[in-house]
Each structure stands twice: as C-alpha cells, then as structure tokens.
Amino acid sequence: MARRGYRLALMARGRGSLERAAKRLREEGAREALVLPGDLRVEADVSRVVGESLRRLGGLDAVVMSYGNPSCEPCHLHEASWKDWMEAAALYLASTGTLLSLLVRENPVKASVLLVSSATYLEPMPPLVVADTVRAGLVKLARVASRAYPGKLRVNVLLLGSYDTPGARETIRRLAERVGAPAGELWEREVVARSPLGRTGDPERLGELAACILEGPDYLSGAAILVDGLMTPCSP
C-alpha cells in the first residue's frame, strides 16, 4: 500500500518498532505514515486509534488487521486458563468486531477490510488450540459484517500457511524447548514440510496479493481465501 502511495496509519504495541516501520514505509512511497501505538486487546486503544486515524486521514479506504498469538502459546487445552481464552477472544474477535462497528458508525467512506488469519483453524493444532479455535470466528464475522453493511464494509479473510516470521520462529522455539527437540529440526518438520511445495511463503508476494484484494471488486466480499502453499488438504 505504501508503494501505491497511500497515506497510512500504523498500530502496534511498540512505539520504537512503529517508528522504524513508518520510516521504511515513507521511503517505499507512503505519502504519510502515522504512528499510533496501541494494543488490540484493549478496547480503549482500538477506539482511540480508529478515531485518531479517521480524524487525521479524513476516512479509511482500506484496513488490514494482523494478529499475533495469545501469550500462553504454545499450550495444550489442559494448560490453557480462563485468562488465556479471554485474551484470545479480545485479540481476535472483540478487537475486530469493535473496529468494524466503528467503521460502520463513523467512517465516511466504504472500507475494504482484510483480516490476516491462519489456515490452521481448519485443522487446529493441539499446541495452538486457543488461537486456532477462537480465530475460526473471523471467517463468520467477515461474512456477517459484509452482508449486513454492504454500503459500508467489504471484509475478506486471508488464511495463511507457513511464513518465516519472528513470531512463527518464537513459537517453534518454545515448542522445541518443551519437547526437547532442536528448533531447526522442528521448523523443517512442522513448518516447511507441511507444504507440498517444500517451502514457506514469500512475504513480499503476500503483500502484493493483499493490496490487490484490498483494491479489488466489490463482488469479492465476505470471502475466506487460502494462501497456504497447499498445506490444507481441503478448502474451507
């Protein structure tokens, strides 16, 4: 979106990381890159950041929501606490529902929204049970919101396979510690080898796809789109 000359508003918890990202995005072509620190798990932060973005940009044409994992993961069902489930519900569903509601009520233009989720919700992994089961609701939420407010929202979901990100590496590192296996070996077996293509996805190409979907036709709405390198045996 930066390369397309958009004005951007960036939200994440760390101001330092946001400042570095904003600088890079301006160099890539963004006309503006606002730094708005906030936590998706906190209602007041979501409302404040959306409100500030609308005030300073005049309206939001496109929104991308990308989520981390709950703090406890990797953890199995018998290890997850009430607090862990509530954190996941806030991170994935409450934050998204709140944002969509604000866009319906306050955004002066129709917004194209892209929710970045995971294909693993189709076949939840035991160590990721909290994230995989809770974020399953994003697909339904995208469909319901798009149908209920076709003049205000166009919401789609990307269901990703394996990408080599710091978060993914950290999850594998924690899991490797728990099972007593080398992290590199576990990465190859549990991440790379799950795709028949024998590799992880390319973040650059994913960015290009996301931009195309955001700018795509209204007829593509409420959809769940698999981008998983054939990792999932059956489509949703």
Image (cartoon, rainbow, N blue to C red):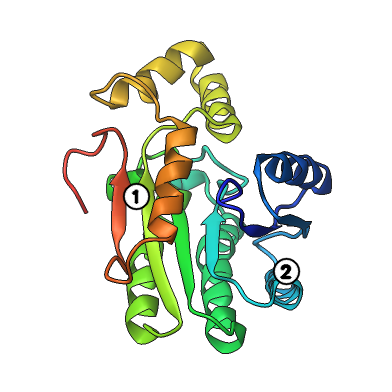
> Looking at the image, can residue 128 be seen?
no
Residue extending farthest to the left is 234
Residue 17 sits above or below residue 49 on the image: above
Q: Residue at x 77, y 60 (%)?
A: 36
Identify the disc placed on residue 121. Answer: 1
Q: Earlier in the sequence, mark 2 or mark 1?
A: 2
Q: Observer-nearest residue: 196 or 104?
A: 104
- Percent position of residue 140, x then y: 33, 69
Q: Quadrant of residue 10?
A: bottom right
Q: Observer-nearest residue: 34 or 82?
A: 34
Q: Which residue is mark 2?
A: 49
How far apart are the alpha carbons under marks 2 and 1? 28 Å
- Percent position of residue 168, x then y: 52, 32
Residue 13 sits above or below residue 192 on the image: below
Residue 167 sits above or below residue 81 on the image: above
- Mark 2 residue element: helix
For label 2, the crowd category at 10 Å Cα-Cα, with few meaning under 14, some 14 to 19 and many 20 or more, is many
Left or right, 49 with respect to 167, comes to right
> Looking at the image, can residue 87 be seen?
yes
Q: Quadrant of residue 103?
A: bottom right
Amino acid type assigned to the residue bearing label 2 in the image: Val
Amino acid type assigned to the residue bearing label 1 in the image: Tyr
